[in-house]
Image: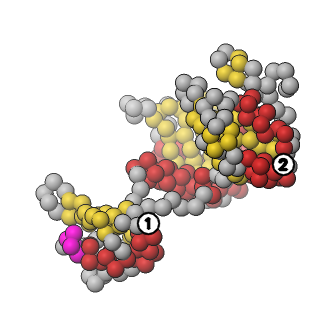
Amino acid sequence: MENLNYVPLNGKPIRIMFSHRDPLIRKTGFANLFIKNLETSIDNKALHETFSVFGNVLSCKVAMDSNGHSKGHGFVQFDNDQSAKNAIEKLDGRLMNDKKVYVGYFVRCQERSSPKFTNVYVKNLSESYTNEDLKQLFNTFGVITSVKIMKDENGNSKRFGFVNFQSSDSAATAVEKLNGSTTNDGKVLFVGRAQKKSEREAELKAFFEQEKLKRYEKFQGANLYLKNIDKSLNEEKLKELFSEFGTITSCKVMSDARGRSKGVGFVAFTTPEEASKAIDEMNGKIIGQKPVYVSVAQRKEERKAQLQH
């Protein structure tokens, strides 16, 4: 570690640290510091040398762009919290290579406070709502710099719009007071921070992943994976073959772009007991001209972890 840490290997400085079997140290961010406004000449080794005087450094990294240049921030993790506190006390706001640096505890993105905003998104508006109506609805919360109801190519309202305030406090108050409120014509409004397309897509992706996980956990052990299915078998025939073991909630034979069977599929029962009975009876059984393979369906992450193990 002393001789080879941060030595360049194929153009990249290698990092050497003690292996920690318990991932909680990494995942909880214990004694992990975030340093920003670093002078670009400060590399991993220089950062490590600066912080190691306060205690045992578990890991140290300067964030780099795709060209290998410093992004001006980095991370240092100690093996105890007192060392981290001492480093913050002594280095936060101090000069490092003639630049005043910020040193504080690292906070995950999802744990950071909501960002300040001035632009508010409003949906479920009445089709007759005008920009002036929208302004009247929001102007009690502060100074408005712009109001816009979105329209289609025919000039008809899309029933959503944006209100931009001069101050973020006004925008936050408007969201708090009006989200979920009912207009005079009975419409229940959604009012929230206007988001970038990438933010909306990330939220939707996280939501669908969570829903997918909930469905999986609900039917865990009751969903079967089949492979080596004879090409002559369709979903109707497959359902007929497996229905004797219990109530089938879904049955699917995967097909290619031309609609031809890929020889794999899924059969879901209402209970794990029914699925277990189907495995015992059907796994290895000749159906058509092939012995079908039947097992409990696994998520991609589980299969990957099992293979790695």
Q: Is residue 30 visible?
A: no
Query: Mark 1 packing: few (<14 Cα in 10 Å), some, or many (20+)?
Result: some
Query: Mark 2 packing: few (<14 Cα in 10 Å), some, or many (20+)?
Result: many
Q: Secondary structure at mark 1?
A: helix
Name the kind of residue labelled 2 in the image.
Answer: Ser
Residue named by callout 2: 83
* Residue 243 belongs to the span the image colors magenta: no
The residue at the point 55 percent across, 40 percent down is 265
Observer-nearest residue: 199 or 279? 199
Looking at the image, tell me whether mark 2 or mark 1 is earlier in sequence order.
2
Q: Residue furthest front?
A: 98
Q: CA distance from mark 2 to mark 1?
A: 37 Å
| Image quarter of the C terminus | top right
Residue 120 in the image, given as x and y percentages of width and height: 37, 65
Question: Which region is colored magenta?
Answer: 129-133
Q: Is residue 164 above or below residue 66?
A: below
Residue 129 in the image, given as x and y percentages of width and height: 21, 73
Q: Is residue 140 above or below residue 29?
A: below
**Chief secondary structure of the magenta span?**
helix
Looking at the image, residue 88 sits to the left or right of residue 197; the answer is right
Q: Is residue 271 visible?
A: yes
Q: Secondary structure at mark 2?
A: helix
Asked where in the image residue 13 lies, by quadrant, the reply is top right
The residue at the point 45 percent across, 70 percent down is 169
Residue 191 in the image, given as x and y percentages of width and height: 39, 69
Q: Residue furthest top?
A: 10
* Mark drawn on residue 168: 1
